[in-house]
């Protein structure tokens, strides 16, 4: 049997409401890998309806979680998406063509973000959303750092064409969902700040409220989305100062306390999370944001 050329990778935590539709879109891939991180719902049962290639365990941060799945992929090319994302038939055909013909190491895929049923294309970024990301890459070309939220991504090798078809991302169900996500993100970011030993300064994070709002609402044309663009810019602007205030004013969680609502991490069952063998030379660092620039 020939080795698979294209692997589809999905990372999930208690995603029973989303997982069926996500995995049903991936039949065009040669194999599907699902990483199940501390799932307590029917996610495992649903995943087994599409694949037997499961990685089960618990990870505290995003990098090791992602690399557990990447290491399990047997394909030369990897399509990495989340449970709240959908591959359209047009995008599936384009991904298949690129994986079969491209000589590059990685490709950007444009993202259409939805808040409920409302498509919002403008204004994403500044750590609160993305309008494109390197979701299609050769194995070894993408490396995730270890932060809990918005980890830095290193990309090595030549960048290929940006795919013209868009990935659908159902990012928030409503405004309450946006605010709950902001709360989760800032809690995880506060933990990263404490771990770094440098939480920043009050004054600098106050100034970032203005600069980040301007970046999203004006620079990234969030004004074109009306009130939705204002909400995105507002959440992006509040993200640094809220994370800073949580890191400074709230007690650090105990070792056994969950940081983001998940249980204490453990180890995966299928494969090692070693990063050995990743190509580091000439690496290109890219934040997973609409501008693809570090924030």
Image: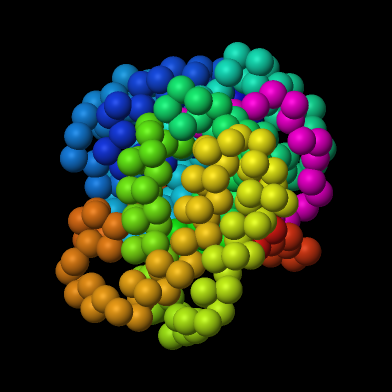
Q: Position of residue 67 (x, y in %)?
A: 48, 53
Residue drawn at the location 47% of the way across and 61% of the way down:
238
Q: Position of residue 244 (x, y in %)?
A: 42, 74
**Quadrant in which the N terminus appears:** top right
Residue drawn at the location 60% of the way across and 61% of the way down:
212
**Quadrant in which the C terminus appears:** bottom right
Q: Position of residue 289 (x, y in %)?
A: 62, 50
Residue 226 is at least partly visible in this image:
yes
Q: Is residue 102 left or right of residue 176?
A: right
Q: Nearer the viewer, residue 128 or 103?
A: 128
Q: Nearer the viewer, residue 71 or 222?
A: 222
Q: Is residue 28 above or below residue 128?
A: above
Q: Is residue 74 magenta?
A: no
Q: Quadrant of residue 173?
A: top left
Q: Is residue 288 above or below residue 196?
A: above
Residue 64 is at least partly visible in this image:
no
Q: Nearer the viewer, residue 273 or 45?
A: 45
Which region shows up in magenta? 155-170
Spot the residue most to the top.
89
Q: Is residue 109 above or below residue 90?
A: below
Q: Is residue 199 left or right of residue 104?
A: left
Q: Position of residue 81 (x, y in %)?
A: 51, 36
Q: How many marks?
A: 0
Residue drawn at the location 46% of the way across and 22% of the way down:
117
Coloration of the structure image: rainbow
Q: Quadrant of residue 183?
A: bottom left
Q: Is residue 167 magenta?
A: yes
Residue drawn at the location 37% of the way across and 48% of the way down:
179
Q: Is residue 88 above or below residue 84?
A: above
């Amino acid at each position: 049997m020939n080795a698979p050329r294209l692997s589809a990778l999905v990372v999930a935590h208690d995603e029973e409401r989303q997982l069926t539709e996500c995995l049903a879109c991936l039949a065009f891939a040669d194999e599907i890998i699902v990483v199940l991180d501390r799932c307590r719902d029917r996610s495992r049962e649903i995943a087994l309806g599409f694949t037997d290639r499961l990685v089960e365990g618990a990870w505290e941060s995003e990098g090791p979680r992602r690399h557990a799945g990447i290491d399990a992929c047997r394909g030369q090319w990897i399509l990495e998406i989340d449970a709240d994302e959908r591959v359209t038939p047009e995008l599936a055909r384009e991904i298949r063509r690129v994986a079969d013909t491209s000589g590059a190491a990685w490709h950007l895929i444009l993202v259409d973000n939805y808040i409920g049923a409302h498509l919002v294309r403008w204004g994403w970024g500044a750590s609160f959303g993305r309008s494109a990301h390197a979701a299609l890459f050769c194995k070894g070309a993408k490396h995730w750092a270890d932060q809990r939220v918005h980890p830095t991504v290193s990309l090595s090798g030549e960048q290929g064409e940006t795919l013209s078809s868009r990935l659908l991302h159902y990012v928030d169900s409503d405004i309450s969902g946006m605010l709950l996500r902001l709360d989760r993100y800032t809690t995880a970011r506060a933990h990263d700040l404490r771990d770094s030993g440098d939480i920043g300064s009050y004054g600098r994070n106050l100034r970032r409220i203005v600069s980040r709002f301007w970046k999203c609402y004006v620079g990234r044309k969030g004004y074109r989305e009306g009130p939705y663009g204002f909400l995105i810019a507002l959440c992006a602007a509040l993200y640094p100062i809220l994370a800073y205030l949580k890191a400074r004013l709230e007690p650090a969680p105990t070792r056994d306390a969950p940081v983001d609502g998940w249980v204490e991490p453990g180890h995966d069952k299928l494969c090692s999370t070693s990063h050995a063998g990743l190509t580091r030379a000439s690496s290109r660092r890219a934040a997973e944001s609409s501008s693809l620039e570090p924030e």
